[in-house]
Amino acid sequence: MSEAIYESLEITVEDYEKYKGKHVVIYKNKIISEGLSSIEALRKALEKHPELKPEDLEITYIPYGETLIL
């Protein structure tokens, strides 16, 4: 059985302002593409980097402002 290890993305204020409200694709802890949907972001990432496989990438959403989860 393998164990997955996840690291949190460290994002700068400039990157937050640039990507807030968007889905981003991360490879080796670096944002490589963005989109209004996760599908669009992944498509752009694979077009820019055809050597990568989808399973090598992480997709996350950068929310607007503070989000309260109850």
Image (cartoon, rainbow, N blue to C red):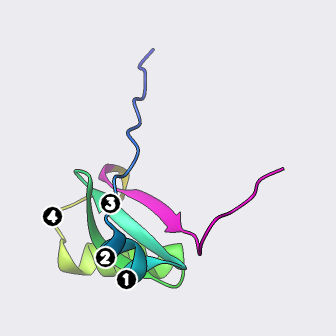
Q: Crowdedness of circle 1 by 10 Å Cα count: few (<14), some, many (20+)?
A: few
Asked if labels 4 and 3 touch by Cβ distance under 8 angstroms, the answer is: no
Q: Crowdedness of circle 4 by 10 Å Cα count: few (<14), some, many (20+)?
A: few
Query: What is the secondary structure assignment of the residue under circle 4?
Result: loop
Which amino acid, mark 1?
Answer: Lys
Give the prevailing secondary structure in the magenta stretch.
Answer: loop
Asked if labels 4 and 2 touch by Cβ distance under 8 angstroms, the answer is: no
Q: Residue at x 26, y 52 (%)?
A: 29
Of residues 61 and 56, the one nearer the viewer is: 61
Q: Residue at x 18, y 71 (%)?
A: 49
Which amino acid, mark 3?
Answer: Ile
- Mark sitting earlier along the chain (2/3): 2
Residue span colored magenta? 56-70
Asked if labels 1 and 4 touch by Cβ distance under 8 angstroms, the answer is: no
Q: Residue 69 location, x and y as percent?
A: 77, 53
Asked if labels 3 and 1 touch by Cβ distance under 8 angstroms, the answer is: no
Of residues 54 and 41, the one nearer the viewer is: 41
Circle 2 or circle 4, nearest the eye: 2
Structural distance between the alpha carbons of marks 1 and 3:
15 Å
Q: Is residue 21 left or right of residue 2?
A: right
Q: Which residue is mark 1?
A: 18
Q: Which residue is mark 4?
A: 51
- Mark sitting earlier along the chain (2/4): 2
Q: Crowdedness of circle 3 by 10 Å Cα count: few (<14), some, many (20+)?
A: many
Q: Which residue is mark 2?
A: 14
Q: Is residue 59 left or right of residue 67?
A: left
Q: Which residue is mark 3?
A: 26
Of residues 51 and 5, the one nearer the viewer is: 5
Circle 1 or circle 3, nearest the eye: 1
